[in-house]
Structures are given as C-alpha cells and as structure tokens.
Amino acid sequence: MPTVNELYKQHEQLKRDGKLDEAASTLEEGLKLDDTHVLSHLALAVLYGKLGKHDLAVDHAEAAVKLEPTDTFNWTALSTTYQRAFEGTQDRQYIYRAEDAKARAAQMQWQK
C-alpha cells in the first residue's frame, strides 16, 4: 500500500498529464491514510478550483489553515482559493472571506 507521500508524488504526475480528476482522487486516497497532510489539502484546493468544485476547494484550503494556523502561506493560499471561488461563482461571501484571510496573512508577517 502506498504512503501519503507516494500518493502525493503520483498526483503530481497525473496533474502534469492533465488528468486532474485522477490527481484529485489520488490525493483524496492519501488523505484517507493521513488527513493531516497539509500539502494534499493545499493541492486539492487548487485542483478542485480548476475543476470548478469551489466548495471542495474552500474546504481543503480551510483544512490546511486549521492544521497549521501559524503558517502565513496557508492563509495566503486560502485567500487565493476564496478569490477563485468568487470568480467561479460570483458569490460575494468569498470576496469578503478572501480579504479577511489576506489581512490575517499580512498581520502574521508583521508579527515575525
């Protein structure tokens, strides 16, 4: 049985090959083994955004922030995911959430 890191590597090749659905499935399989694998959550946020599954993209970006709330990159990625969700859905809640996440990332940078 492959490890979560091996599945993450497999997803990268599938993504390069343009097989986004398969890449997402591979990452989901990895998260069944270890649901705390932040890189998988971040990658799924990007993939699901590209696939137009914005609710799932947001869920995974939020999971990354919950797992590592002091990582500035995760907050920036969350902001970007919200922005893409807004672009895809025109649901204004996402743009407000994007601004909040962006502000959190900026605040964390100044505190370092």
Image (cartoon, helix red, strand yellow):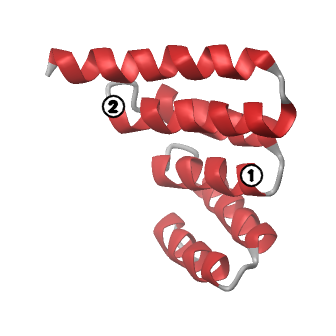
Residue at the spot 56% in from the left edge and 37% down from the top edge: 80
Q: Pick whichever, 75 or 9, lies toward us.
A: 75
Q: Pick whichever, 64 or 2, lies toward us.
A: 64
Question: x%, y% of residue 90?
Answer: 84, 28
Q: In this view, does 108 lie above or below 19?
A: above
- Tell me how far mark 2 sits from mark 1, CA to CA: 22 Å
Q: In this view, does 69 lie above or below 76?
A: above
Residue at the spot 58% in from the left edge and 23% down from the top edge: 98
Q: Quadrant of residue 72?
A: top left
Secondary structure of residue under mark 2: helix
Question: x%, y% of residue 82?
Answer: 65, 31
Residue at the spot 69% in from the left edge and 34% down from the top edge: 58
Q: Pick whichever, 7 or 19, lies toward us.
A: 19
Crowdedness of circle 2 by 10 Å Cα count: few (<14), some, many (20+)?
A: some
Residue under numbered circle 1: 48
Residue 83 in view here: yes
Q: In which quarter of the image is residue 85?
A: top right
Q: Is residue 27 above or below residue 42?
A: below
Image quadrant in which the N terminus is located:
bottom right
Q: Residue 110 carries which label?
A: none
Question: x%, y% of residue 5?
Answer: 47, 68
Residue 34 in view here: no
Q: Residue 72 carries which label?
A: 2
Q: What residue type is labelled 1?
A: Tyr
In the drawing, does residue 72 fall left or right of residue 94? Answer: left
In the drawing, does residue 72 fall left or right of residue 15? Answer: left
Q: Compare marks 2 and 1 and give the one earlier in the sequence.
A: 1
Q: What residue type is labelled 2?
A: Thr
Q: In which quarter of the image is residue 35?
A: top right
Q: Are marks 2 and 1 in contact (CB under 8 Å)?
A: no
In the drawing, does residue 74 fall left or right of residue 87? Answer: left
